[in-house]
Image (tube, grey):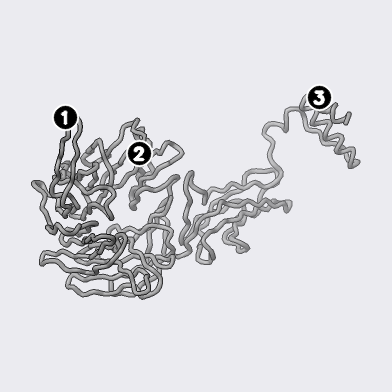
């Protein structure tokens, strides 16, 4: 106890020296007492040290590695130089070099849904240093090629540009040019922001849930339109659309011109999407034909909206497309020519749903009526085709397709439920089923397994891509 008390009262350098002396005496070994102030300036470590350059995790979010992964590492300068640097996945050596590694490593042999690389450096004296990378999600399919990764969460991605956010930096939003790697800062002092790409720019909604900072819609590039409100956004080709509470707006971003819908949109609580935007700029939406304003005194009034129907947005008065006041049309989808929607008929204690296709030749009922508690269908319209889901006999969800000539094909076989994320420009179907991603080159073609379901598929110029949390991939089936 006295010895401990003595050490506790000494200055720190002397304390450390005496402690080392006591430890050495206990082992009958001479004490190695460091000089006061630590090791000499410029001292070089005697053991190998490894710097991992790739792969590294993003600042935020998770990173998916797919197909092949670039492994890049090097030994730092030490007194005992590194003569061998190896990279392992499990017990399998996947790359090696004298003092550095820069290799493209196949992930085809990886089992499971994650991977971690182990780097082993060996010095000229046989000393080893082992370091490991972070754990990454993995898609081993060689059909996948990573095009880029960003340090935060992807909001919208294309082969040449990407919008991403960093939540730790007050929801900062950036627009990156992939070719140059240059970021444009899009955040404008709001509590929350979300963006979508269009040719030559982006549209961003600043939500500001606290209502203490600027909010609304702003375009960057294109027509640079602004709106004090904002909500459900969409971009297709040269067009952007968004809602401002119960009003719909469309902008031709390459020829500045904003068109406003002249009917109030159905409320937020309505089932399914309130409008759809086609590649050619056609917009269809569910709106109210009329409303009744009642004033009980000079300071209070109420508005009752009546008769929801489907409309097509026009430069002049919008065109009413449905006229049945006994049912409610909802969740419209269009390819610019054909219109698909759900028709709901409500009765006491129950609702029935029909899936309806409207073409220039008339209306066709694709499915129903079905009794359900909520919207039972999911569907897309593209190039004259309609692809849709229906509950199967066993309760699983299956996918069907109707051709422009009216032929109906079941795309998926009975079994696990299938979900429809996207339809390509030539009616290529990409779907999720059983935790996997499948592609049908055309609705009556066989399904091909193209990888796991850890990303959102997209089509650009008839090529298939996939957007993960922080990375963007091309898929070559």
Which residue is at the front of the view, 472 or 271? 271
Is residue 209 visible in this depiction of the protein?
yes
Answer left or right for 159 relative to 112. Answer: left
Where is residue 314? Give x, y as percent: 12, 49
User: Helix, strand or loop at disc 3?
Assistant: loop
Residue 197: which numbered mark, if any? none
Label 3: few (<14), some (14–19) or many (≥20) C-alpha neighbours in 10 Å: few
Looking at marks 1 and 3 on the same chain, the residue that comes earlier in the sequence is marked by 3
Q: In this rendering, would 65 be left or right of 311?
A: right
In the displayed structure image, the side of residue 180 where residue 82 appears, left or right? right
- Point 38% across, 62% down: residue: 475
Q: Nearer the viewer, mark 2 or mark 3?
A: 3
Element marked by disc 1: loop
3D distance between C-alphas at marks 2 and 1: 49 Å
Q: Quadrant of the image for the N terminus?
A: top right
> Vertically, is 276 above or below 292?
below
Per the image, the residue denoted by label 3 is 10
**Residue placed most toward the observer, 289 or 302:** 302
For the residue pair 343 and 470, the one nearer the viewer reads as 343
**Residue count near mark 2 (Cα–Cα under 10 Å), binned few <14, some 14–19, many ≥20:** few
Q: Quadrant of residue 410?
A: bottom left
- Return the residue found at the far right: 28
Task: State the separation of the CA atoms marked 2 and 3.
Answer: 56 Å
N-term mark: 2 or 3: 3
**Residue 427, how many percent across, how many down?**
26, 66
- Quarter that holds the C terminus: bottom left
Identify which residue is drawn at 48% across, 57% down: 65
**Quarter where residue 360 is shown:** bottom left
Residue located beneath label 2 in the image: 184
The dot on residue 298 is 1
């Amino acid at each position: 106890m006295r010895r401990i008390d003595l050490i506790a009262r000494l200055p720190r350098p002397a304390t450390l020296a005496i402690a080392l002396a006591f430890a050495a005496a206990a082992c009958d070994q001479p004490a190695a007492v460091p000089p006061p102030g630590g090791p000499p300036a410029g001292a070089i470590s005697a053991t190998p040290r490894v710097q991992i350059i790739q792969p590294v995790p993003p600042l935020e979010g998770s990173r998916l590695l797919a197909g092949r992964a670039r492994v890049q590492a090097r030994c730092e300068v030490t007194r005992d130089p590194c003569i061998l640097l190896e990279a392992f996945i499990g017990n399998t050596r996947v790359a090696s070099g004298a003092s550095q590694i820069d290799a493209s490593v196949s992930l085809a042999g990886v089992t499971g849904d994650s991977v971690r690389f182990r780097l082993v450096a060996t010095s000229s004296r046989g000393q080893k240093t082992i370091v490991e990378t972070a754990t990454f999600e993995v898609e081993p399919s060689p059909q996948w090629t990573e095009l880029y990764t960003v340090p935060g969460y992807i909001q919208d991605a294309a082969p040449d540009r990407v919008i991403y956010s960093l939540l730790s930096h007050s929801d900062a939003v950036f627009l990156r040019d992939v070719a140059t790697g240059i970021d444009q800062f899009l955040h404008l002092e709001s509590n929350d922001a979300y963006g979508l790409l269009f040719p030559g720019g982006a549209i961003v909604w600043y939500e500001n849930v606290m209502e203490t900072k600027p909010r609304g819609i702003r375009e960057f590039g294109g027509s640079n339109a602004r709106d004090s409100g904002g909500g459900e956004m969409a971009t297709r080709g040269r067009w952007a659309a968004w809602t401002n509470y119960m009003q719909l707006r469309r902008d031709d971003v390459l020829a500045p011109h904003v068109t406003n819908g002249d009917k109030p949109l159905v409320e937020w609580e309505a089932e399914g999407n309130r409008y759809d935007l086609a590649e050619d700029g056609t917009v269809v939406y569910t709106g109210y034909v009329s409303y009744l304003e009642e004033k009980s005194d000079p300071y209070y009034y109420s508005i009752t909206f009546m008769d929801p129907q489907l409309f097509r947005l026009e430069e002049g008065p919008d065109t009413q497309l449905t006229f049945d006041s006994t049912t409610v049309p909802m969740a419209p989808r269009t390819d610019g020519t054909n219109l698909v929607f759900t028709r709901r008929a409500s009765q006491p204690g129950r609702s029935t749903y029909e899936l309806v296709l409207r073409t220039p030749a008339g209306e066709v009922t694709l499915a129903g009526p079905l009794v359900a508690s909520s919207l039972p269908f999911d569907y897309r319209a593209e190039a004259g085709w309609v692809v849709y889901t229906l509950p199967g006999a066993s309760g699983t969800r299956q996918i069907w397709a109707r051709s422009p000539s009216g032929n109906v094909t079941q795309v998926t076989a009975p079994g696990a439920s299938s979900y429809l994320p996207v339809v390509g420009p030539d009616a290529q179907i990409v779907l999720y089923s059983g935790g996997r991603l499948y592609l049908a080159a055309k609705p009556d073609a066989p399904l091909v397994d193209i990888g796991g379901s850890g990303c959102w598929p997209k089509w650009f110029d008839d090529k298939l891509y996939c957007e993960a949390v922080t990375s963007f991939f091309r898929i070559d089936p």
